[in-house]
Amino acid sequence: RRTQVAIIGSGPAGLLLGHLLKAEGIDCVLLERASREHVESRIRAGVLETVTTDLMKRLGLDERMNREALVEDGFNLADGDQMVRIDIKALTGKTVVVYGQTELTRDLIAAAPQRDLEIVFEAGDLVLHGVDSAHPKVTYAKDGAPVTLECDFIAGCDGFHGPSRRAIPQHLAREYIHEYPFGWLGILADVPPCHDELIYANGPRGFALASMRSPTRSRYYIQVPLTERIEDWPEDRLWDELELRFNGISQHGVTRGPALEMSIAPLRSYVFETMHYGRLFLAGDAAHIVPPTGAKGLNLAASDVLYLSDAIIAHYRRKDESALLGYRDRALARIWKSERFSWSLTRLMHSFPDQNAFERQMQVAEMDYLSRSPAMQTAIAENYVGLPV
Ligand code: FAD
Ligand code: DHB
């Protein structure tokens, strides 16, 4: 079989790209290894920038989001019992919304049939072929039968562990890796949030984040050593820890409840600059990872896809190749700035195991400075709401 653009992966990057291309009459097929149930139940990011909500609006798929998302005018940075509110609306004129990645993904998958967007779930053994030739193709297995999909372009939207990045020859790969000596343990529960806005908190016991999905559903994270496993964290131990961190600084205090989900994710910064090779283009986590502090991961996937869809549309509409050739540099300019912000907020808000007393004083001084400086708060706010696309 044949299509114009083969899209590998149906996370936010692949789904948004598929809908954007389909809206312009460009033929594409999404190939996803996991089942629909699996994709729809993964709990991940929660904060959306305007770049992401604008794409949903452009697609006409923002109806449920407009109804259910919580608009955030500000968020809080705390160190111990000192808390600074960053008034993003006053400082930038913009806001962010809380709407789970899970909900965004569900909306995009639910709308696929009516837009004639084909998603092949449970596509196994996927391999990319001839990505540097004029006739690339993707082979995969569906219900045990081998399938070959010929195409003009391949969009690698298959996340950090997917095969697309690995289809680029090693000697051309330019990559940057920075690992952090901790992970985040997350919990989702149907209890009211402890505070009306998000709180990113540092302290002697490490980082903690109080977030939410709705007025009745909370999402919390705490920093844990990489050696720790989920079995080490019975729910009561985690709630005890969250009460210690947030009861002193939050408006309502922590409400405990049964966990709907708990998981540990390692923190890393990663950029694979070779985002374009022949007929293959990478977007989203396939090309870069940010630590979750600052909620940039999903929103970066959205800006990549905005640029890539523009470029593919220019190719088919006007035979204009310049946007495809410029995709990598255009995307990287925004990626590196989000990498910088996520790294810098991670460095400010976590307790590093090998941190010396001087480095701790640098965190204290930075918090004290930003608590008094509208200029510093503005710099944080404009990164948090998302840099221009
Ligand atoms: P993904 O969402 O990873 O989608 C890639 C898709 O490709 C998946 O559906 C996968 O099944 C599919 N795929 C992989 N291999 C193959 C294959 N061989 N064949 C076919 N399909 C394949 N960001 C935040 O801002 N805040 C958070 O709290 C946060 N938490 C996270 C927790 C975890 C555990 C992870 C992994 C990420 C988290 N992120 C978070 C980051 C954010 O979720 C990602 O940046 C976002 O999902 C990127 O979207 P994507 O579409 O590029 O990749
Ligand atoms: C959430 C995750 C983040 O990484 C973040 O910075 C803010 C909120 C969340 O899952 O709600």
Image (spheres, rainbow, N blue to C red):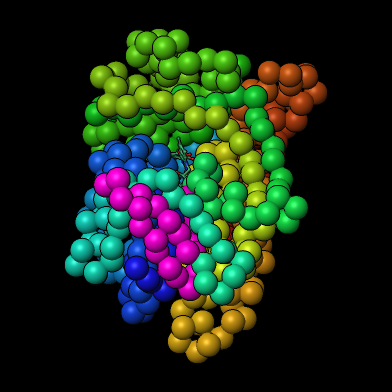
- What's the residue at 42%, 42% (across, down)? 45
**Where residue 144 appears, x then y in whole percent?**
30, 45
Q: Which residue is at the far left?
A: 114
Give whichever of 36, 98 is nearer the camera.
36
Q: Residue at x 58, y 33 (%)?
A: 267
| Side (left or right) of 364 relative to 203 | right
Q: Nearer the viewer, residue 180 or 386?
A: 180
Quarter the C terminus occupies: bottom right
Asked whether residue 195 appears in the rendered view, the answer is: no
Frontmost residue, 52 versus 263:
263
Quarter of the N terminus within the rendering: bottom left
Q: Residue at x 32, y 27 (%)?
A: 261
Residue furthest to the front = 145
**Magenta-drawn stretch, dominant element (helix, strand or loop):** strand
Report the span colored magenta: 137-158
Residue 290 on image: x %, y %: 58, 43
Image position of 360 with respect to 37: above or below: above
Residue most extreme to the right = 358
Does 69 appear above or below 212? Answer: below
Vertical arrangement, residue 45 with respect to residue 107, above or below: above
**Horizontal side, residue 182 vs residue 47: left or right:** right
Q: Is residue 322 visible?
A: yes
Question: Is residue 142 one of those drawn in magenta?
Answer: yes
Is residue 97 magenta-colored? no
| Ligand 2 placement by image quarter | top left
Horizontal and vertical percent for residue 64? 22, 56
Residue 32: percent from left, percent from top: 36, 50
Above/below status of 193 relative to 123 = above
| Of residues 246 and 267, the one drawn nearer to the viewer in this rendering | 267
Whether residue 103 sits left or right of residue 358 in the image: it is: left
Q: State how many labels appear.
A: 0
